[in-house]
Image (tube, grey):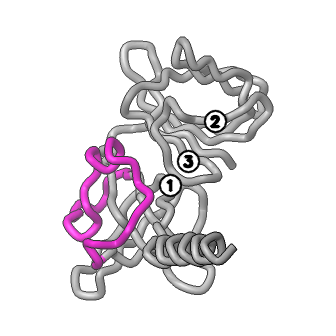
């Protein structure tokens, strides 16, 4: 009996010690927009966001911050404190809600200055095998987008690689894509 009691306390102590050593990770999200200003002194990036949300982002200064941010997506972006291009369309990777404080920009991915296709609509079909997403805009026009290894998707759980997009038939989404050779390749998929 005494042995079982000691084992129980030992197990509880191990679990408590493990729980205390875990650190919370910031969930990284993404949105698109155009960089309009960068202040190196105040460490603020201003983005005219495509979704109309507040476009002020403070720059991440803690290089050791614990982030839930896929390595493949991170590798294609530039750290927010090193990004210097204004007037370019970007994917902003950030954490925070912006409700009581500025959101924190972790990294930015340069989408260039050329025209991008931006479509809002309802998911008709997500074909994971063929890597295709078909949506219908409010006017009833269906558009199909190719999803490749550079596509990024914003989900309820944060930013994920495009092939992990979990959009379902009937979901409302916004797609930012690049047209090339008659194919529109999705750069960013965001559930509305």
Q: Are the residues at dot 3 and dot 1 in contact (C-beta closer than 8 Å)?
A: yes
- Residue 111 rendering spot, x and y as whole percentages: 34, 44
**Where the N terminus falls, by quadrant?**
bottom right
Instruction: Kindly identify which numbered label has been placed on residue 92.
Output: none
Marks 3/1: CA–CA distance:
8 Å
Q: Which residues are magenta?
A: 61-90
Q: Inspect this view and state whether residue 96 appears.
A: no
Could you tell whether 160 is left or right of 87 in the image?
A: right
In the rendered image, residue 76 lying in the magenta stretch gets the answer yes
**Picture residue at 37% right of the left edge, 14% below the top:** 181
Q: Which badge, 2 or 3, comes first in the chain's sequence?
A: 3
Q: Residue at x 60, y 47 (%)?
A: 155
Pointer 1 residue: 31
Foreground residue, 14 or 170?
14
Mark 2 or 3, closer to the camera? 2
Q: Can you identify the residue that label 2 sits on?
A: 166
Residue 132 showing in the rendered view: yes
Q: Say what secondary structure mark 2 lies in.
A: loop
Residue visible at 40% across and 38% down in the picture: 115
Mark 1 vs mark 2, foreground winner is: 2
Does the magenta portion include 165?
no
Q: Secondary structure at mark 1?
A: strand
Residues packed near mark 2 inside 10 Å, few (<14), some (14 to 19) or many (20 plus): some
Query: Which comes before the other along the chain, label 1 or label 2?
Result: 1
Tag 3 residue: 154
Dot 3 falls on a residue whose secondary structure is: strand
| Residue under the point 36% across and 65% down | 106
Taking 75 as reference, is 181 left or right? Answer: right
The percent coordinates of residue 92 (x first, y second) are 41, 58
């Amino acid at each position: 009996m005494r042995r079982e009691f000691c084992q129980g306390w030992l197990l509880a102590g191990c679990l408590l010690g493990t729980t205390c050593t875990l650190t919370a990770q910031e969930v990284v999200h993404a949105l698109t927009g155009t960089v309009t200003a960068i202040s190196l002194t105040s460490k603020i990036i201003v983005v005219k966001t495509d979704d109309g949300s507040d476009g002020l982002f403070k720059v991440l200064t803690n290089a050791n911050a614990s982030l839930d941010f896929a390595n493949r997506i991170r590798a294609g972006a530039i750290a927010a404190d090193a990004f210097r291009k204004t007037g370019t369309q970007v994917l902003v990777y950030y954490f925070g809600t912006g409700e009581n404080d500025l959101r924190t920009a972790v990294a930015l991915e340069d989408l260039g200055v050329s025209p991008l296709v931006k479509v809002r609509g309802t998911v008709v079909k997500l074909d994971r095998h063929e890597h295709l997403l078909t949506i219908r805009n409010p006017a009833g026009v269906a558009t199909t987008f190719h999803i490749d290894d550079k596509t990024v998707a914003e989900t309820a759980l944060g930013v994920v690689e495009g092939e992990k997009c979990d959009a379902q038939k009937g979901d409302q989404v916004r797609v930012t894509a690049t047209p090339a050779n008659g194919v529109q390749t999705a750069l960013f998929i965001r559930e509305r």
